[in-house]
Image (cartoon, rainbow, N blue to C red):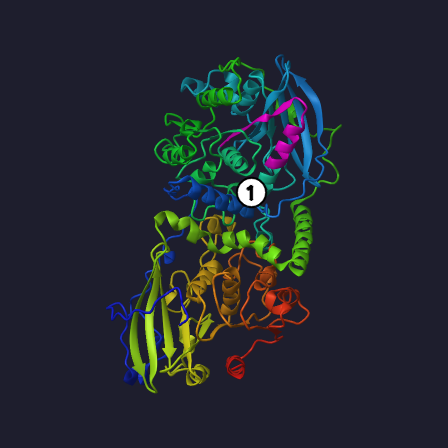
Amino acid sequence: MTSFRFTQIIILASLLMGTSASSFAQETAESVSRVFKEGRSSSDARLGKLRNLKDAYHPWIPPTNKNDWIETAEKIRTKLKVSNGLIPAWSKTPLNAVVHGEIHRGDYIVQRVYFESMPGHYVSGNLYRPTKLDGKAPGILSPHGHWTDARFSDMGEEAALKAIDEGGEKYLSGGRHHIQARMVHLARMGCIVFHYDMVGYSDSKVIDHRADFADAEAGSWLINTMGLQTWNSIRALDFLTSLEQVDSDRIAVTGASGGGTQTFMLAALDDRVDVAFPAVMVSTAMQGGCVCENADYLRIGINNVAIAALFAPKPLAMTGANDWTIDIESKGLPELKQVYSLYGQPMNVYAEAHPEFGHNYNYVSREIMYQWMAEHLHLSEASLEETDFWPIPQEELSVFDEQHPLPENSKSAAELKKWMIGELQKNRAEMQQLAQENFAGYQSEMKEILFTLFDQQRFLNRGQGETTYKTETQKIMLEGDIELVKGTFSARTYRFSIPFLSLSPKEAPKTVFWFDEQGKSHLFEEDGGINQDVQRLLDAGYQVISTDAFLTGESKDSKIGYSRPVDEKYSGYTYGYNAPTLVERVRDLNLFMPTSPKEGEVIIVGTGDAGIWTLLAASTDHANINFDRLVVNLDGFTFADIEKTSDPNYLPGAVRYGDIGGFGMLANPQNLLVVGGVAEKSQTAQLLKLGTPGQNGKLRIESKNLSRKQIVDLILKAE
């Protein structure tokens, strides 16, 4: 027999609803298909409170052996690249760096810098260097974070005196200009430091920090502020390592708060970083409160500790304060120690919290950082004690002036997004060419992307034990020797329970999985009788199975509706921690699909919105499911047409990776793929033709949706 992910075990459980054939006269489609008793619902943890960045506790359990960690680290790193829009990575176009305006301060020099991380997008900042250098010096990147006025920050005399009085600062200069203070002292220690702006701060004001790249179009291409800033950090490292006096074997990065997020993100993604010190950011509590610290898919199943762990076994140190990082020594550091111990390097990770201070990168924290840098950048003769300095005012630090105005080719957010989409469209064309010439190569390229978009939760939940599936069912005999089986399908690691039902004639060697946006009730007429088209399948010897995918049928939740609520400002606040509604539905349907060679024919059908979910389910798990024919209606759907991130079929990144046609070409039924509601000359149709069914003459495209009768006619005619 065909093997499915669930096994039918007949258990008359009190949870399940009892029904007899004689009672059907009083039934409706909803009531006759109901699995749970009236008033009871699915025990589905996904219906509970969604994760969000402000949760008090974001746990993560690291693997306990090195091989598992290496595999896990690779999956997490791919996730970071996908969520930051770095697969494919942007082309490293010429930086066209401009360095000007030396400011001499005795033992160090400050210069003004700007360069193009992308054509027309400028990264600005200041370069601090020792006045005298004997040989090459370590290079340090320093992102500033969300401090008032950022790179130009001046906390004022009153705040500085208070910081001194509380023991957080030594000098008025450091108290007022704590950001400049660390650049100055690192330069005095013998390092070359590049202090650069976040998007929307200081001299980088062309693009707004929070308002841009939060729309559905940007999300569909995985263009976001966090990804842009991460790319800016990578290009900043390109700039720093291009300097003749920088030792590319001694590269560090340090920042606090939002700058801490940039620090551990860059450290996780760029192998050139040798030492990292993210201050007051890594924790199991709040994960980052800005759009520049969040992205779709980023933290599903993980937290900032897991991201920081990707730097292992290189030297990583952190500070905590009386904020969300207060417990870093007991929550976060132990997990990091566990990972570092897998490499025999537990001493290479360190954290120290100072709860007597609020959110900060004050002298006490900076001194810990100086010690870490001196040890791991081999600065044995450097003085670790800060001394007073002469702060540089904003007008002198500012990069653009009359002699060096903002270049005319500087792009607005809309212009930059247009350019980025243009580049990604070129990549899609290259992927299409790859599919034509080497389809196996295309499948390989898409494998990890599909994993991140659809299947990462299953893998990252492994710390909770292997996924085990359980089925509870009740068998009812209907008129005409039709067996109705109602049941629930659950998986411990997913913490859900999905209701399903099966209709079978006495002999049923063949199976139809028929999924619909209404859920399993679509198998019945309004009066509770079996739908006439379903009856035709039963008469022909087919077993028919259906289920309620997430938030359909009995899985609906009156408080949630048809789709999960999505943060109105930015979907990354929701889908950075929770799978999109569409992904949950695709995963549900995928779990019901056959997984091993069959004895009888297996046909999969998707109608309504479930046509989209079914095609994706059959495409994303193509290596593990076995079926003969796939019939879906798409009703002209494309992800590119979605205008709101609240749309239940919104899938971040879908357009970037080929839209519905790019995914659908991976579906590979043994005999036939039929897709309704697709125009013959549409891009969707052209992409579907590149898949194995299209190449083998097993693809049929219909411009109009197939009716239920036409679907059944097609199934029966092929016998």
Q: In this view, does 586 lie above or below 371?
A: below
> For the point 34% across and 57% down, which residue is it?
468
Q: Where residue 687 appears, x then y in whole percent?
A: 64, 64
Quarter of the image containing the N terminus? bottom left
Rendered image quadrant of residue 691: bottom right
Q: In this view, does 719 lie above or below 120?
A: below
**Residue 607 colored in magenta in the image:** no
The region drawn magenta spans 233-256
Q: Where residue 660 appears, x then y in whole percent?
A: 58, 63
In the visual, does 186 lie left or right of 404? left
What is the count of numbered marks? Answer: 1
In the rendered image, is residue 160 in sight? Answer: yes
Residue that numbered label 1 is attached to: 226
Q: Where residue 507 appears, x then y in whole percent?
A: 38, 82
Nearest the camera: 394 or 488?
A: 488
In the rendered image, is residue 303 in sight? Answer: no
In the visual, does 529 lie left or right of 107? left
